[in-house]
Amino acid sequence: MSAQSNSIVIEGNGNVTIQDVNNSPITINTNNTDEVLAKLNKLDQVIIDSLLQVVEKQDERVSTLFKTLLNGIAKEKNVVKGSISNVQSVKVGDETHYHYHYAEARLPKELTLTIPRIHPEDIIGREKDIKELHELLSTGKRTIVVNGLGGIGKTTLVQVYLSKYYDEYAHIAWITQNSDSIANDFVNDGGLIRNLSIETGNLEPEKLFEEISRKLKGIADKPNLLIIDNGELALSNYSNKLPGQPNWHLLVTSREEISGFHLLPLDFLSVEQAIELFKKHYPLQKLNEQDIKELVQTVDYHTLTIELLAKTAKVQRYDAAKLKGAIEQDLRANVEVGRQSEQVKKIGTYLSTVFNLSKLSEAELWLLKQFACLPPDFHTYNLLEELLIDEESSYKDIFAETVSNIAQKGWLLQNRDTDSYKMHRIIAEVVKKEQRITTADVLTLISSITQQLIIDQTKDNPIDKFVWLPFGQAILAYFGEDTFTEIADLQIKVALILRQLGDYKEAKKLLEKAVLHYENEFGQDHEITIERYTHLASVLQDLGEYERAKNLFKTAALWAEENLGEEHPTTSGRYSNLALVLQNQHNYKGAKILLEKAMLSDEKSFGKDHPITAVRYSNLAGVLQDLGNYERAKMLYEKALLWTEINLGEDHPVTAKRTSKLATLLGGMGEEERAIQLLEKALSSDIKNFGKNHINVANRYSNLVILYEKIGDYSKALELTEKALTILKKVFPEGHPYIETGDSIYQSLKQKIE
């Protein structure tokens, strides 16, 4: 503001007239208390300061009453003398004119009441971000939004920046957006109004905001720093009204992407940094390094939650297992966290206030419910549309904009390069806690994943289905205890994939839950329930529970005979299932009768070149091998393997399985060299498909052990036995026949070597 000339006139009768170039003259009767108070209260600080200096000249015509009241008003306005320069008095008749010049009132460095700062040494892992922020602000990009998930550390970063570069700025203002209107938040900061000498009068908040902005822009000193913490999307409407370059650096923190501002995304801490942050707030030794590592991984390296869990662990002495369920169980905390030293009574409840869902639309809430039931990974837009939207969806027409909006508001993490989206685990926990998600809410998702998990044994490679397993498990993690047929169907599909992966224990748990549901829903003699019995029986067979498996397979076979007839394909399949359990129990003759019956039925129903018939050939060959009929077994094995290689390919798991079966037969027929070659081929395929710790890999090792022992290479056989046992003991419970057999072979080989 440029200097302006004004005057205060002391009249002959002692009254005072103020001639301000910006306003009409004001005359004050200095002997009238009410008039003095009323008129002095309307004057700004600069004129009050001028009056104080005039009165100090001890003009006898100014009443004692006026001097007393003036000093009282000055104290209320916190006037600091010294804004006037070049005060000169001129006598005109019986009046004394005091002429003075005044410029901008002296402004404090901190323009707002609150300027929160954190020492740079108190932050972990943000040195690079602070440096980048300073470079952006110092090189012309003076309108910055530090953007990131709520609770990731945006405010803390800016507080540290403010502390580190405090001395570089002439004036600093900090406004926290607590309402829907940033104008209200500016106006509600009393320090800003007072320091800028703004008369509030009856002005509306928007007009007052404009006056504040005008005053800020008029400050000649530079550079200055304006920080708006927790800014919202609507802030873009004020971008041209807020002070900016060249005199002001404008810095905003927001979980939302605000148009018109330069975006500085804030990423998550690294594993090492997250562990360091936890230890900073947790000085005890009850939790070890591995406990802490697992905890920070569980919360997906979310800064605020790490601090909260660490402080809670310190105060409440919770162990790692309890802390992992802290949000879901809403554990007691009673600690303070760094967000303006907020008191946290319960963990889940507090995080629900940090991530407030109340402002979201119905469509946005629906989308968050879907993401809460998805794996916590990035998913492409095309995949999301495929899984979540069908022709009947009421959100079909607005799906694209809903995804875009919810990501812009900071509820989803976005990878623009791959057009993919992810919900952070902490937000997912809050959504689950605050929104009661029903199967009806995510029915399309459940149906989509159930369909993706179906394996067509005649053509599908189960390996291709493994990618969908985490999706099914994520849904069941939320709905696993619900008694709905849609959930039971999904449990069956997930269990069958787990069986392919060799996780028989978890598959059994899911199948038993599902079977119980079908028994209650449809009855024990219903066709659907009977089919579910066969799935459970197969896993029981894998686990060595042969008698229980046999009873379920027998129940299924009898139902098929009675309801479908002995030559129906379903009946032949159940004969085959029952036969394999009989084979496990060494009832080879009984198994042979059932398998020959099934084979003849399927040859008649499907022909000799059908995949189902190939299954019967392979199964019958195994029993014939046990009975010593090697030639016929070899013929059937080769027949089944040839069909498999042609139709499914050499890398298919079924091809590896049948290659292995043929190899064991050839080994028994004295063709050890060829048998080893085939088994090595099968082993390589299984490792490629399933990894080194799969049950199929253990079976291949076991088959090779027999051959190496037969040719006298006991050391190699012992080495492979150890590998097989390591896998078997992870997959099967103690006492399983496979483990007992493996232990027996191991001891025998050790004796032979010794």
Image: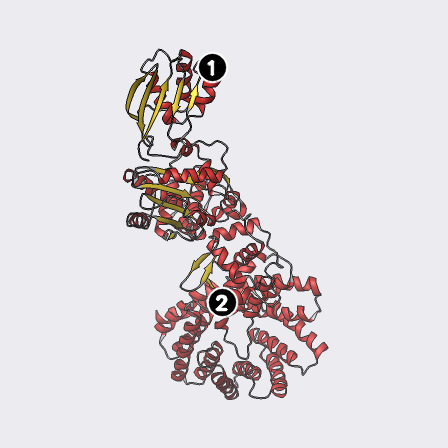
Residue 524 versus residue 588 in the image, above or below: above
User: Could you tell me residue 217's position as x and y percent?
Assistant: 36, 41
Question: Residue 157 lies in what quarter of the image?
Answer: top left
For mark 1, what is the residue?
32
User: Could you tell me residue 393's position as x and y percent?
Assistant: 60, 64
Asked whether 293 or 574 is in front, the reply is 293
In the rendered image, which quarter contains the N terminus?
Answer: top left
Asked whether 651 or 423 is in front, the reply is 423
For mark 2, what is the residue?
382
Camera-side mark, 2 or 1: 1
Under mark 1, the amino acid is: Asn
In the rendered image, which quarter contains the C terminus?
Answer: bottom left
Asked which secondary structure carries label 2, the reply is: helix
Q: Point out the tag, 2 or 1, that comes first from the N-terminus.
A: 1
User: Could you tell me residue 277's position as x and y percent?
Assistant: 37, 45
User: Could you tell me residue 747's position as x and y percent?
Assistant: 41, 67
Under mark 2, the amino acid is: Asn
Indicate how the structure is coloured in the image.
secondary structure
Asked which secondary structure carries label 1, the reply is: loop
For the question of whether residue 54 can be seen, the reply is: yes
